Image (cartoon, grey):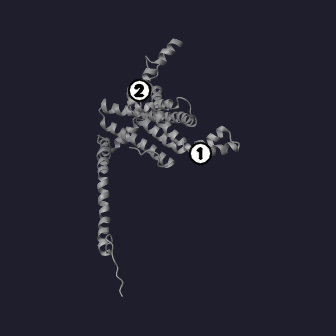
């Protein structure tokens, strides 16, 4: 007797199922392309095309592509670039030091007003750069608090809001919230048993910090430091507010574009600024992993 095979209502012969599966496989790339199309259009319209246009403008002057080299050879531009690099490096170092100490303390200790203190430390995230600059003026400007106090104590008024020192203070104030949140998030994941083991082996508190805590926080510190450096390199609002005696690259670009009408030089300097910040983020990403945000 021959066996009789019965098919359920959901079973299909292989000859009928194979074409349907093939059509599904052929349709997957189309569906994927349809999903990616809006993102690709936005990327091309708001990033790729403006960037290509900016690069072309930088080479659109009388000197052509040589404008990028001559722009770097200009003493004023080189001085502005050096000042911006030094300022950003200093802001990054101070911000990392302050934020690491404060972040570890806030993670390890709970006390009345803890939540309020964290909120106050992160409050500058709500301020644009212009407001930060105005606050620096209120603190260290001609009518600021520091000037009033020093005049009462010494007879001379200390004013530094409109110099690199004022811009440094504003950038540090602006950067601490971003770094301290990253440090606190990383510090909460530290295993306290590693520190206890180091202490049981006779390590001093400083050795525990140097050999256990800082290596564990290294990826977060590199990531936060790279973002702090990139932000300080390109910040404009605070520098514009305090721009009496300040020579940084964003202000140089603004001056070339608006006052000198040298659009090619402004574009070339903008490309240079973007390359520097991108390089800093790329190096940090290669060292710390994928936790560093992509430059954009």
Residue 4 in the image: above or below residue 166:
below
The total number of labels drawn is 2
Judge left or right: residue 79 versus residue 207.
Answer: left
Judge left or right: residue 197 versus residue 153.
Answer: right
Residue occupying the far bottom of the picture: 1
Mark pair 2, 1: CA separation:
40 Å
> Which mark is first along the chain, 1 or 2?
2
Tell me the quadrant of the picture where the N terminus can be found.
bottom left
The residue wearing badge 2 is 133
Q: Residue at x 34, y 82 (%)?
A: 4
**Which of the two residues, 117 or 237, is positioned nearer the viewer here?**
117
Measured from the top left, where is residue 208 in percent x and y?
64, 41
Q: Where is residue 62, by image quadrant? A: top left
Residue 151 in the image: above or below residue 84:
above
Q: Residue at x 50, y 36 (%)?
A: 180
Circle nearer the viewer, 2 or 1: 1
Measured from the top left, where is residue 244 in percent x and y?
40, 24
Judge left or right: residue 217 versus residue 40.
Answer: right
The crowd level at tag 1 (other Cα within 10 Å; few <14, some 14-19, many 20+) is few
Q: Secondary structure at mark 2?
A: helix
> Are dots 2 and 1 in contact, CB under 8 Å?
no
Tell me the quadrant of the picture where the C terminus can be found.
top left
Question: Which disc number belongs to residue 269?
Answer: none
Residue 274 in the image: above or below residue 94:
below
Residue occupying the far right of the picture: 202
**Which of the two residues, 78 or 130, is positioned nearer the viewer here?**
130
Q: Secondary structure at mark 1?
A: loop
The residue wearing badge 1 is 191
Measured from the top left, where is residue 121 in percent x and y?
48, 31
The crowd level at tag 2 (other Cα within 10 Å; few <14, some 14-19, many 20+) is many
Measured from the top left, where is residue 204 in percent x and y?
68, 39
């Amino acid at each position: 007797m021959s066996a009789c095979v019965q098919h359920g209502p959901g079973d299909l012969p292989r000859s009928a199922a194979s074409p349907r599966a093939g059509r599904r496989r052929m349709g997957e790339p189309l569906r994927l392309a349809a999903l990616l199309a809006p993102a690709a259009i936005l990327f091309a319209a708001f990033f790729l095309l403006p960037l290509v246009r900016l690069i072309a403008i930088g080479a659109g002057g009388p000197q052509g592509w040589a404008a990028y080299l001559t722009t770097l050879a200009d003493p004023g531009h080189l001085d502005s670039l050096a000042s911006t690099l030094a300022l950003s490096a200093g802001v990054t170092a101070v911000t990392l030091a302050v934020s690491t100490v404060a972040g570890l303390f806030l993670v390890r200790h709970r006390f009345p007003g803890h939540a309020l203190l964290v909120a106050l430390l992160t409050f500058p995230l709500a301020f644009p750069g212009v407001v930060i600059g105005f606050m620096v003026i209120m603190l260290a400007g001609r009518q600021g608090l520091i000037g009033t106090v020093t005049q009462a104590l010494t007879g001379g008024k200390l004013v530094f809001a409109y110099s690199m020192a004022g811009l440094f203070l504003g950038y540090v104030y602006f950067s601490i919230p971003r770094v301290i949140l990253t440090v606190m998030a990383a510090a909460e994941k530290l295993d306290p048993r590693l520190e206890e083991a180091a202490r049981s082996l006779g390590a001093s508190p400083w050795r525990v910090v140097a050999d256990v805590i800082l290596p564990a926080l290294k990826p977060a510190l590199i990531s936060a430091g790279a973002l702090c450096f990139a932000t300080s390199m390109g910040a404009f609002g605070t520098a514009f507010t305090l721009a009496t005696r300040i020579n940084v690259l964003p202000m140089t670009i603004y001056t070339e574009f608006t006052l000198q009408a040298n659009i090619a030089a402004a574009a070339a300097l903008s490309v240079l600024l973007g390359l520097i910040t991108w390089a800093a983020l790329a190096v940090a990403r290669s060292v710390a992993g994928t936790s560093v945000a992509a430059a954009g």
